[in-house]
Image (cartoon, rainbow, N blue to C red):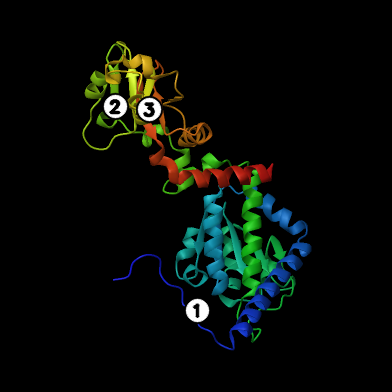
Amino acid sequence: METGRPRRLHVRHEGNREHLEYARQVLETEAAALRTVRDRLDESFAAAVNLLLTCKGSVIVTGMGKAGIVGQKLAATLASTGTRAHPLHPAEAVHGDLGRIGAEDIVLALSYSGETEEVVRLVDPVRQIGAKLIAITGRGQSTLACAADVAIVLGPLNEACPLGLAPSTSTTAMMAVGDALAFAVSKARRFEPEQFAAFHPAGSLGKLSQSVRNLMRVGTEVRLAHTGRTVREALIEAHRPGRRTGAMLIVDERGVLQGIFTDGDLVRLLGRTDLDDPLELPIEHVMTRNPATIGESATVREAVERLSRGKFSQLPVLDEHGRPIGILDITDVITLIPDLDREQDSTAKAA
């Protein structure tokens, strides 16, 4: 049986070039639309940002069809960047789900035509509840735009669909403007990576913002030995079953860390030809004194930065008295290094 990477299917066909050219045309049409919408943004966008910043309740995002799907994504983006938000299907709303809307909420309605029946039907109930209404629409004179407290008007756009009918360019523009709205609000709130991570505990960013206590190895996974031992005695003393790191932590009689002895140190020691029995040397003569360490209150992000910057493989975690309570091994966090690099690049570009 064949293993490895899946094979890519390359089929030569006289229509391939035509398909590629058309795909590029679709992308260019949508890219051009985004540039057009960018230039059309006006004070209504800023007004929408300010309204969201003053919202004491939740942002209820609604839309029908493809716009509704965009709305679900927008609600998720808002929620993950510090603005409490929930999607609401407009048809379900008039069958009882209007009870999800409160007077302190803001309804963010998406409809390119501004005349979508299910969405427009929500205007009066929303007014009766007392919630504010923000519209993202293509037509400034539409029913939805005229009823809204703030209307972000995209203006006329040509759909990329070959029939000029299926929502494509319009939904791309809605999604982009929705992202811009969510991120403008997040930026104004000075939303920090640590806050973002709190909403993403299962993601790599969430792991980076956790305490090192959550990822460090503890107990039998930490090899400890005492000063005053020979290398041989320390190796025996520090023996642990199961998973272990490639480092031995050397502590004094008070349990305070004095040095670190790695598998690499052992290999170099055994390679010395000037010693009759290198294993009989006192461990403190060959350990690395004052190794890099990290405190138990530090984040995984700080630990990964230190491991990456120092180009070493183990990082002892110490309590306030300098006693090791655990150890982080590079193999525990190596998958987080690319995410940290991307985060730092993004921060540098934003600055």
Quick one: label 2, few (<14), some, or many (20+) residues within 10 Å?
Answer: many
Q: Position of residue 348 (x, y in %)?
A: 66, 42
Q: Name the kind of residue labelled 3 in the image.
A: Arg
Mark seen at residue 223 = 2
Left or right position of 41 against 69:
right
Distance of mark 3 from mark 2, alpha carbons? 19 Å
- Label 1 close to label 3 by CB (< 8 Å): no
- Residue 88 vertical placement versus 113 (above, below): above
The answer to which of marks 3 and 2 sits earlier in the sequence is: 2
- Residue 218 vertical placement versus 2 (above, below): above
Q: Which quadrant holds residue 158?
A: bottom right
- Label 1 close to label 2 by CB (< 8 Å): no
Residue at image coords 51%, 62%: 87
Quick one: label 1, few (<14), some, or many (20+) residues within 10 Å?
Answer: few
Residue at image coords 33%, 67%: 3
Q: Secondary structure at mark 3?
A: helix
In this view, the mark in front (1 or 2) = 1
User: Foreground: 333 or 278?
Assistant: 278
Left or right position of 61 against 155:
left
Q: Name the kind of residue labelled 2 in the image.
A: Arg
**Location of mark 1 (residue):** 10
Q: Is residue 223 visible?
A: yes
**Location of mark 3 (residue):** 268
Q: Secondary structure at mark 1?
A: loop
Mark seen at residue 234 = none
User: For the C terminus, which image quadrant?
Assistant: top right
Left or right position of 238 against 294:
left
